Amino acid sequence: MLKAARMANVRRVLVHLSKENNRPQRAKFQQSIVGHFCAASKDSLMVNCGLNQRQFLISDAEFAGSKQALLQRPTFCPIKHLSDAQAASLPAETRDRGVDVGVAILLQSACRKVLLTRRSKSLSIFPNLWVPPGGHIEPGEQLLDAGLRELREETGLCLQDGEFSWQMLALWESVYPPMLSRGLPKRHHVVVYLLLLSPESHQQLQMRFKPDEAEVSAYTWLEPQVLASVAAAEDGAGDPRKVAEDLPPVVRITELQQGSAETTTIPTATFLNTAPLQGEDVERVSTGTKFALRLWLDTLALQPK
């Protein structure tokens, strides 16, 4: 989903924060976006957001071109639990990064399957995790344009105006490493999840794929039944949601290696893995993706069949 800048001189769009009647200020790396607007015990709230003078602005007041959206962080958000001493120990280079903005595209086919991609093991953040296509917004881009560009760069799929409908799902405060027990924060993002509805089947869409192996090591299309259980396998939850017992034992994926694409299967249980508290991460669906999938599942009842 998110990756390092392709060129050192590319200036990414950064989050700016504003409270009513206050001037927008650039969010600090060690500052929780959710915590800026609400009590420390809360992990979600409704905000107004949008691009404003080439920067991404999150505010508790409406502004020109803004959209209202849910902003959420995980209960174990490292920034939320960062002590003053830990924040002071962060390298100056890290503290000066600010908070970057990314866009992730939840692409739904005509048969209500959703595309997930497995990030390459060589990527510097969140390697080998299953996520929707996405990445950083570049200066001058609109949210949808950035998402479509990342979709094209990662999968080769080029969608034109009139080939889909779309809506904003929500915002997610993302930090890497994802838990403080696994190291001090190195990256801090707000991820904008967009839902794209295509009238084409997943087979038709896949015929136009030319994935970038440097970023994507595999991809799959998952149906609502499986995705509901994926979303229920919530990371850090004290009381996990019920997972369906009638899931297929394996999931069919397309794996990419040395320029070739091969269809294979992996255990469905891989997609139900949760984030470990310590040590090496495991192949799993990212926490932010599970959050977005829960919201996507809520949209299905509103979609025409």
Image (spheres, rainbow, N blue to C red):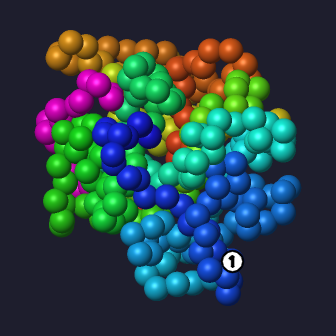
Q: Quadrant of residue 230?
A: top right
Q: Could you tell me which residue is drawn at 41 percent across and 36 percent down? A: 4
Write the start and end of the magenta stretch as one range: 198-216
Give whichever of 97, 284 is nearer the camera: 97
Give whichever of 44, 178 is nearer the camera: 178
Kind of residue at disc 1: Lys
Q: Report the side of 153 relative to 23 (left or right).
A: left
Give whichever of 255, 34 is nearer the camera: 34
Pick out the residue farthest to the left: 208
Image location (x, y in percent) of residue 295: 56, 55
Which secondary structure is most common in the magenta stretch? loop
Q: Quadrant of residue 276?
A: top right
Q: Is residue 135 above or below residue 305?
A: above
Q: Report the side of 180 relative to 52 (left or right).
A: right
Q: Could you tell me which residue is drawn at 63 percent across and 74 percent down? A: 18
Q: Could you tell me which residue is drawn at 79 percent across and 36 percent down? A: 86
Determine if the magenta segment contains residue 199. Answer: yes
Q: Which element is circle 1 on?
A: loop
Query: In which quadrant is the N terminus drawn?
Result: top left
Determine if the magenta segment contains residue 8. Answer: no
Image location (x, y in percent) of residue 292: 53, 50
Query: In which quadrant is the C terminus drawn?
Result: bottom left
Label 1 crowd (10 A; few <14 / some 14-19 / many >=20): some
Tell me, yes or no, if residue 144 can be seen here.
no
Image location (x, y in percent) of residue 142: 33, 66
Q: Report the side of 10 relative to 224 (left or right).
A: left
Disc 1 target residue: 19
Image location (x, y in percent) of residue 167: 41, 66
Q: Could you tell me which residue is drawn at 59 percent across and 26 percent down? A: 272
Q: Quadrant of residue 228?
A: top right
